[in-house]
Image (cartoon, grey):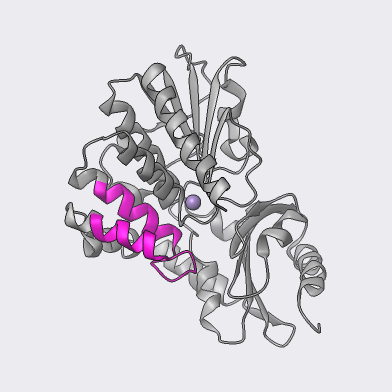
Amino acid sequence: MEKKNYQYQHTLSRIKECVQKENDFLITTHVNPDGDSIASVLLFASILKHFGKRYIILLDDQIPEKFDFLSGVNEIVRFQKETYSFQPRVVVVLDASGLDRIGKVEDIIPPKALIINIDHHTSNVMFGKFNAIAPEKSSAVEIIYELFVLCNAPLSKEIATFVYTGIMCDTGRFLFPNTTYQSLSICAEMVKYGASPSIIARNIYQRMSPETLKALAKALSTLEFHFDGVVSSIYLPNDILSSNGKIDTEGFVDHLMAVKESEVQFFMLEKEPNHFRVSFRSKEYVDVNKIAKQFNGGGHIRAAGCNIDGTVDEIKNRILEVLKKHLPNK
Ligand SMILES: [Mn+2]
């Protein structure tokens, strides 16, 4: 453990040196960006600003509206087909377990670019020249905050807000087991520097569009329990999802955790007809990273995801088959 920790600290120092020495950075993160990934790109950009570096933040996805209160979010460029004249020397990939998670941005990485990989997913495949991977951390932003401190970059209310937001989102509002002494201490420190827990929570959790709440109601109406209630599932069909661009399904699966007996929860979102994004959660003993891996996905022990093609019933049955092997006495 100590050796691992030494390695991690050493990698952070090397990343700091790289940031000081190099110029022309491309910062990116995974598709379907969440609070942690958006906070991570903005926090990393603030380190580059501190050193006066040229950079671009490029994502193969739109930023959900609920994050529009984060300062600098307008700086994030959405990937489009046109070729970029900007040639990055360093590509910074945050909160992504593999390059396949960053979508089309992967295609424009120059072969000679240095890759910095900062992540907290157990399933990270170490694709960078520098890999600062710490699955014990609550979030990617927690790791980048350590780098931020190491770089002596100055804290402000805006930056404190990024860090608090990232940790709040990835700990499921401080409910998941990754809510640790360290993550809470950092959040307390951020509040000292001006981050407002109530304003942040209101921005992220209390601005849902009516269409999203209706879609949630629709998804919950598909609720099914399996294996005596140890597993529960919901789905949202594509016709509902595509009927309105304002539907944001992040966090839908978390509602299933409310039932005492439910250990594993999964949500099948039909992103395109017969193409599903599946999100898994678990509470205590099932490693859902392993379940998602069976379908070429991954993530964390308690939260993971994958893409599967087929009809909703086919997919559900395939998942239940795999889950059965991971449940005691089922
Ligand atoms: Mn994360």
Q: Position of residue 223 (x, y in %)?
A: 62, 78
By secondary structure, the bulk of the magenta-drawn segment is best described as helix
Q: Work out whether residue 326 or residue 35 is closer to the camera in this orientation and state it.
A: 326
Q: Residue at x 67, y 59 (%)?
A: 289
Q: Position of residue 21 (x, y in %)?
A: 39, 17
Side (left or right) of 5 relative to 205: right
Q: Residue at x 48, y 36 (%)?
A: 10
Q: Work out whether residue 329 or residue 200 is closer to the camera in this orientation and state it.
A: 329
Q: Position of residue 303 (x, y in %)?
A: 58, 62
Q: Residue at x 38, y 59 (%)?
A: 183
Image: 262 above or below 74: below
Q: Is any atom of residue 208 visible in this view?
A: no
Side (left or right) of 72 relative to 264: left
Q: Work out whether residue 69 or residue 172 is closer to the camera in this orientation and state it.
A: 172
Q: Work out whether residue 307 or residue 198 is closer to the camera in this orientation and state it.
A: 198
The region drawn magenta spans 160-189
Q: Position of residue 56 (x, y in %)?
A: 39, 24
